[in-house]
Amino acid sequence: MNENEISYLVRKCIFNVYNELGPGLLESIYKKILIYELEENGLDVQSEVLLPVLYDKKQFNVNFKLDLLVENKVILELKSVKSLEDIHFKQLYTYLKLSNKKLGLLVNFNTTNILDGVKRVVNNL
């Protein structure tokens, strides 16, 4: 599957989780339930993936952690905040660049409409 096909399935899973649980819970709860939902839909999911930083041809283990990596292609950055801020988008974009991935989804579960809470961030897609 390509990134867009994965994204379509991931969004379906996000909607299922949101429709069942609603807004206002902790990010950690959404993460556990979303992992279950993604795996039930046949997707490979890795959680808390360590992301090193390359600088001057050297690798630095600075403990960046991707919330979720789906099918080794799409990064999910999960939030449960009042509103998404510019820094959240920049953070995901930096993760995409550092990992050489093309697509990320920034998801805020603390919203009255989950359609407004899912944002695509791309890196050379």
Image: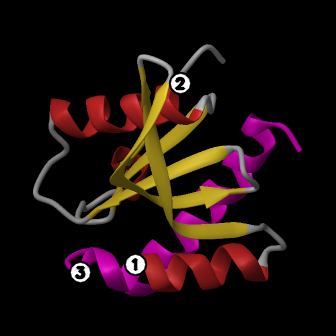
Q: Quadrant of residue 5?
A: top right
Q: Position of residue 54 (x, y in %)?
A: 46, 29
Mark 1 in CB contact with mark 3 (< 8 angstroms) = yes
Segment colored magenta: 1-30
Q: Residue furthest right?
A: 1
Calculate the distance from the C-alpha at mark 3 to the C-alpha at mark 2: 26 Å
- Side of 25 where 114 appears, left or right: right
Quick one: 40 or 28, which is closer to the camera? 28
In the rendered structure, does residue 21 fall within the stretch colored magenta? yes
Earlier-in-chain disc, 2 versus 1:
1
- Side of 85 where 43 appears, left or right: right
Residue located 38% across and 30% down the image: 94
Is 8 situated above or below 10? above
Give the residue pinned by disc 3.
26
Q: Please indicate, yes or no, whether residue 72 appears anywhere in the rendered image.
A: yes
Q: Position of residue 107 (x, y in %)?
A: 39, 53
Picture colour scheme: secondary structure
Q: Amino acid at mark 2?
A: Val
- Side of 47 where 89 appears, left or right: left
Q: Position of residue 64 (x, y in %)?
A: 35, 52
Q: Which mark is residue 122?
A: 2
Earlier-in-chain disc, 3 versus 2:
3
Calculate the distance from the C-alpha at mark 1 to the C-alpha at mark 3: 7 Å
Give the residue pinned by disc 1.
30
Q: Amino acid at mark 1?
A: Tyr
In the rendered structure, does residue 5 fall within the stretch colored magenta? yes
Is 45 situated above or below 56? below
